[in-house]
Amino acid sequence: MAEATAPRMRQTDEELRAELERRERWRSQEESRRQGVITAAQNAWRRELLDRHRDIDEQLREEGDRHQKVGLAAATAGDLNSAWAEYIQWRKADTTRQAVRGEVQNAKIQLDTDEAVLPDLRPRLGTFLEYLEAAEHPAAGNLAEDQLLELIGEMPSTYEEAKAAQDAAQQVNQ
């Protein structure tokens, strides 16, 4: 009796092995298909990035420049809270700009294209203290100019101003 069941078990083992092999082939094919979908989507994303990277870079440059200008004006006026907030926004825009250019370089390599792209961007930023130092001379200069005008007045630069100054001087001398 044991001999009669043994061939049937071998056949079942062979059937199971064949089913496992079939399922493994299907799983492998499905993984390849899914990876193909992922690769196609990633390449489309890279292509779009290559197409838009100059516009993105320009947008970030303008944003950074705007924050830098506003922040330096705030620092010049002595508003360090606003200067700090604008400095951080400037750094964010510049750091994002660097990262975008890095992604563009990677996309170019992955797509194996000779397309001209913007080069990597070197950081143009310093510390907050260096940022404030850029505002130091204009701030002191503006204050000195205000004090100078207060102390000595403004020198006449037009005929009307010169005539008015002459008339005022004559009235004081009379």
Image: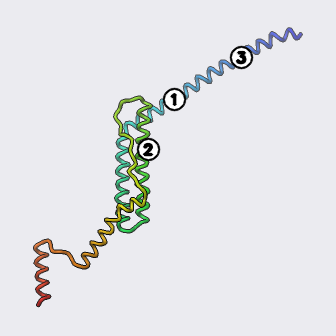
Whole-angstrom CA distance, mark 1 to mark 3, is 30 Å
Q: How is the image coloured?
A: rainbow
Quadrant the C terminus occupies: bottom left
Quadrant the N terminus occupies: top right
Across and down, in percent, residue 107 comes to: 43, 35
Amino acid on which the number 1 mark rests in the picture = Val
Amino acid on which the number 3 mark rests in the picture = Arg
Q: Which residue is mark 1?
A: 37
Marks 2 & 1, CB-CB < 8 Å contact: no
**Which residue is at the front of the view, 2 or 138?**
138
Across and down, in percent, residue 135 comes to: 35, 63
Eye-nearest disc, 3 or 2: 2
Residue 50 to residue 2: above or below? below
Eye-nearest disc, 2 or 1: 2
Q: Which residue is mark 2?
A: 99
- Is 1 positioned to the left or the right of 9 in the image? right
**Which residue is at the front of the view, 126 or 170?**
126
- Marks 3 and 2, the one that precedes in the sequence: 3
Looking at the rendered structure, the secondary structure element under dot 1 is helix
- Marks 2 and 1, the one that precedes in the sequence: 1
Whole-angstrom CA distance, mark 2 to mark 1, is 26 Å
- Is 127 positioned to the left or the right of 12 in the image? left
Looking at the rendered structure, the secondary structure element under dot 2 is helix
| The quarter of the displayed image where residue 43 is located | top left
Residue at 58 percent across and 26 percent down: it is 31
Amino acid on which the number 2 mark rests in the picture = Ala
Q: Which residue is mark 3?
A: 17
- Marks 1 and 3, the one that precedes in the sequence: 3
How packed mark 3 is, by other alpha carbons closer than 10 Å (few <14, some 14-19, many 20 or more), is few
Residue 128 to residue 30: above or below? below
Whole-angstrom CA distance, mark 3 to mark 2, is 51 Å
Residue at 11 percent across and 83 percent down: it is 167
